[in-house]
Image (cartoon, helix red, strand yellow):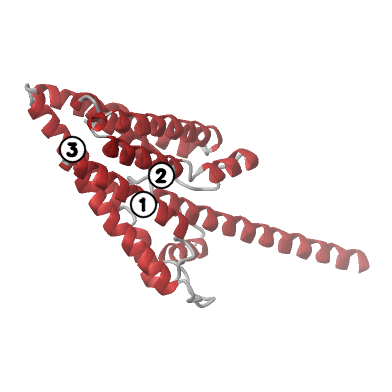
């Protein structure tokens, strides 16, 4: 248990502190949402997934017993992700609100209930229950850490780190290191494995940042999503980019991408409206002159 060795407890406390900072990373985003009273087109799925994984780890810590440090940080995660989702639901469009409620009931109610049911039905003994639940946590948490693959692909393709904040990448990597050490000291493979994956992807992001940080992409260089949106706009269709990421980390990066694209769309729409008004005024002036 964490309390049996002071150094194990100290590592767990450091992991809590770094993860606390990671959970607070989207605060500026949601401050902007409250100020502008609009979600600016970004997705809620990363926050639904973050709430889901926090709930799952709390259940694992409860079944294992004695894992107070896992409970504390994930309890805070549940609280802050709930706050984010309440703000999102308050200011998002009706369609996005319906989708968010659907995802919450699917994952945070339906899947959690299914996991609880399976662990009690399939595993009668406590040891078997811990093992089954532990592997479920490993699979889902590994998918969380694998989510940054999308932004890594974007960085390599565009040779630009514009959409990959180095501060968040460093925080997530340090957090994974702390929890990897904590898992090793506890000899808990279920805590160790997903964080090993997290360190791997975090290191890749940091290396890519230092490779491409001085590279300036061409003016006509666009992300694949932006190219698709431009094509759809020419056809008179509205392009909606859905980023399905079950991640506390990759989700935040993609949120910023979605916000920047949405701001660009708003600016373009305003320019078009101004041009139309100018043409109307010019036409009216010519008629009056004639």
Image quarter in which the N terminus is found? top left
Which mark is first along the chain, 3 or 1? 3
Which residue is identified by label 1? 174
Looking at the rendered structure, the secondary structure element under dot 2 is helix
Q: Which mark is residue 136?
A: 3
Give the side of residue 246 with respect to residue 47, left or right: left
Q: Nearer the viewer, residue 19 or 42?
A: 19
Which mark is first along the chain, 2 or 3? 2
Q: CA distance from mark 1 to mark 3?
A: 24 Å
Looking at the rendered structure, the secondary structure element under dot 3 is helix
Q: Is residue 150 above or below residue 57?
A: below
Instruction: From the image, state whether disc 3 or disc 2 is nearer to you.
Output: 2
Residue lying at the far right of the rendered structure: 289
Give the side of residue 220 with respect to residue 198, left or right: right
The percent coordinates of residue 208 (x first, y second) are 37, 68
For the point 84% across and 62% down, which residue is it? Answer: 284
Which residue is identified by label 2? 18
Image quarter in which the C terminus is found? bottom right
């Amino acid at each position: 248990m964490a309390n049996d060795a002071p150094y194990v407890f100290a590592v767990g406390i450091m992991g809590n502190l770094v993860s606390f900072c990671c959970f607070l990373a989207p605060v500026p985003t949601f401050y902007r949402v409250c100020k502008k009273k609009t979600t600016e087109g970004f997705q809620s799925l990363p926050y639904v997934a973050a709430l889901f994984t926090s709930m799952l780890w709390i259940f694992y810590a409860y079944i294992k017993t004695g894992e107070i440090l896992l409970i504390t940080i994930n309890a805070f995660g549940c609280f802050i992700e709930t706050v984010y989702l309440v703000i999102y639901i308050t200011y998002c469009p009706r369609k996005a609100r319906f989708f968010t409620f659907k995802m919450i009931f699917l994952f945070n109610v339906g899947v959690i209930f299914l996991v609880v049911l399976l662990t009690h039905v399939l595993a009668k003994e406590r040891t078997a229950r811990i093992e089954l639940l532990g592997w479920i946590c490993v699979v889902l948490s590994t998918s969380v850490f694998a989510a940054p693959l999308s932004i890594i692909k974007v960085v390599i393709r565009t040779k630009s780190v514009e959409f990959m904040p180095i501060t968040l990448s460093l925080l997530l990597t340090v957090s994974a290191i702390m929890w990897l050490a904590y898992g090793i000291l506890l000899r808990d493979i279920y805590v160790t494995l997903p964080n090993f994956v997290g360190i791997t992807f975090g290191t890749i992001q940091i290396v890519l940042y230092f490779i491409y940080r001085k590279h300036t992409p061409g003016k006509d260089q666009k992300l694949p999503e932006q190219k698709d949106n431009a094509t759809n706009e020419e056809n008179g269709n509205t392009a909606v980019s859905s980023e399905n990421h079950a991640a506390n980390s990759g989700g935040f990066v993609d949120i910023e991408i979605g916000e920047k694209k949405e701001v660009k769309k708003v600016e373009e729409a305003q320019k078009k409206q101004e041009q139309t008004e100018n043409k109307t005024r010019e036409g009216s002036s010519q008629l009056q002159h004639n």
